[in-house]
Image: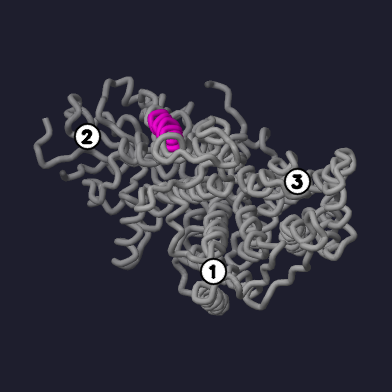
Amino acid sequence: MATPTSQETVFPPPLVEGGHTFGSVTDAICGVVEKPTSNGWKAAFTAALAGLALFGVSVGYLIWEGTGIWGLNNPVAWGWAIVNFVFWVGIGHAGTLISAILFLFRQKWRTSINRFAEAMTIFAVICALTFPTIHVGRVWLLYWAMPIPNQMGLWPNFRSPLLWDVFAVSTYFTVSLLFWFVGLVPDLATLRDRAKTKIAHTLYGMASLGWRGANRHWQNYERAYLILAGLSTPLVLSVHTIVSFDFAVSVVPGWHTTIFPPYFVAGAIFSGFAMVLTLAIPARKVFGLQDFITVRHIENMNKIILVTGMMVGYAYAMEFFIAWYSQSAYESFAFVNRAFGPYAWAYWIMVSCNVITPQLFWFKKIRTNVGLSFILSIFVNIGMWFERFVITMSLHRDFLPSAWDYYSPTIWDITTFVGTFGLFFTLFLLFLRFLPAVAIAEVKGVMPQANPHWEGYHQHSDAAHGTTAGHGDKVHG
Amino acid sequence: MADRRTWGLLAEFENPATLLHAAERARDAGYKNFETWTPFPIHGMDRAMGLKGSKVGWIVLGGGLTGLAGALLLQWWTSAVAYPMVIGGKPYFAWEWATPVTFELSILLSAFGAVFGMFALNRLPRPYHPLDRIPRFRKVTDDAFFLTIEATDPKFAQAREFLEQAGGRNITEVPA
């Protein structure tokens, strides 16, 4: 107790830059929400709404006309819809990784980006969930996937991975939303207490549930948060595992492999971190949050992208090895066909973006270069979309050559996918406008002066035993 | 003793260190109904206030076990009792294929336990609190650190003197 524990020597680079005090952290982060709406935001929001409208039209027409408007054909019954579903779910996983797994590993640098990444998770999962929903064709019968008693007396088939997926993704969405909301409550209280207008005070007041920072509340809160992190960690691993079961439990060559669960999870984390960078790099610049989302954060995320990118690369290689080693003619053909068949172009885009370009992150100069990190993160986003495309296109040449066909998307496949970006960015821009994009209370908690045994306090409290005279400069210094 | 119209006393402290120290002194002086209010959780405060551990974990356990049992029951009953059907030559029920849904529902109800249990233990939502009438208290979600002693505390009569000695500033009586 007596020896001062020096945070500075344990964690050399500061987690928050710019010499902030608690008050200036509040001001900086709440300022983003409290400032009048900028023209840049309005322009971006208009573009996002246009995308959302495109999505609405595409989905509306699909429901009216049926899935025949898509490019699906007989061997390729799962086209872009499943590709996009897996793409969006995967993106979501980085948010949970940052909020839960890095929390359990006490990676305090996560606090600046976790709010942001969790929001991304929720909106990405919303986009993902639309695809299986509309892919069923008759969306009004979707309740058949739920164990609801009905006049047919039939129940869903719990032996089907597709049903597991319903439970996995909906649980994932619900738990992510709760986790995000729990994290938001103290910060909503901050916005409530700073609100200038009655309407803002009432709305933030209702959303914050009357949080006032009592220590008895913090005690339960911290415990609940820790448990949620502990629950979300296996959850996120299970979700993409179950998504991979959609493929792996079938008997299609190229899908029926045991490497799929870990390979999908690594890919999900890989693509998710890329998306966090794609979103965070412009946002920190536009909203002046460079003190919180620092180059150190970007570098750490680039390291994770490098590692998970190599895991994905390993999986690509191992799939080929096993295809040869199994001596199954169908399996071998599926992989040769991937790399050299009609979809070779997609395969090599995937390999270039996921395996080759991330190798540039070996160089510290590139890892710490914000502009290059942004560009490389886009490459990963593209590469990971193509990975799912390549996997799904295993269907196009299955067992009998008489059944083979080439799949191309129609204009409606494209508009639906582009439209989900409209949906995503509409939600994301609303989040940036009305909610604190950085976890205020958590960031304060990792600042050195949050520790009651911080050196700056210690010399005084020993001498003066709690008398506050003369402390002011030190605290805010 | 305090009159009925008083909720308690509010004192402000300069920083987490002085507040922690004051909480330790309040605990040692035998105060029971006191609370500290901070913008973020302060490491060591539970011990300083003499609090017992949180009960959230037990609620989570209850939720998790309910999810586990409910999911197994649901899958077994629908597949083996209500409408037994042979699918792919598989048995009517097997724990292997029941595992994913069982796992997900256990997690889901555990998470409900954690979130709703935490709010219930904290008696939230709570739209109004006597402290809301103190304008300065709004800084609690920004950068201020407070300690309150409630009028229901047996030692409330000495509370003001105690808070002054502990280094509290702007000591204010909070009306009920």
Range of residues picked out in magenta: B60-76
Residue tagged 2: B150
Residue B69 in magenta stretch: yes
Tell me which corner region of the image, top left, top right, bottom left or bottom right, holds residue B27: top left
Q: Are tags 2 and 3 found on a single chain?
A: no
The amino acid type, in three-letter code, at marker 2 is Glu
Residue located at (47% from left, 70% from top): A35
Q: Are marks 3 and 1 in contact (CB under 8 Å)?
A: no
In-image side of A234 versus B83 (left or right) = right
Q: How many marks?
A: 3
Residue B122 appears at what percent x and percent y?
31, 38
The amino acid type, in three-letter code, at marker 1 is Leu
The amino acid type, in three-letter code, at marker 3 is Thr
Mark 2 and mark 3: span between their CA atoms? 54 Å
Identify the element where label 3 is drawn. helix
Tell me which corner region of the image, top left, top right, bottom left or bottom right, holds residue A346: bottom right
The answer for which chain carries disc 2 is B
Q: Are tags 3 and 1 found on a single chain?
A: yes
Residue tagged 1: A423
Residue tagged 3: A308
Identify the element where label 2 is drawn. strand
Residue located at (78% from left, 49% from top): A254
Asked if one can make out residue B81 in the rendered structure from this viewpoint, the answer is yes
Callout 2: 10 Å neighbours few (<14), some, many (20+)?
Answer: many
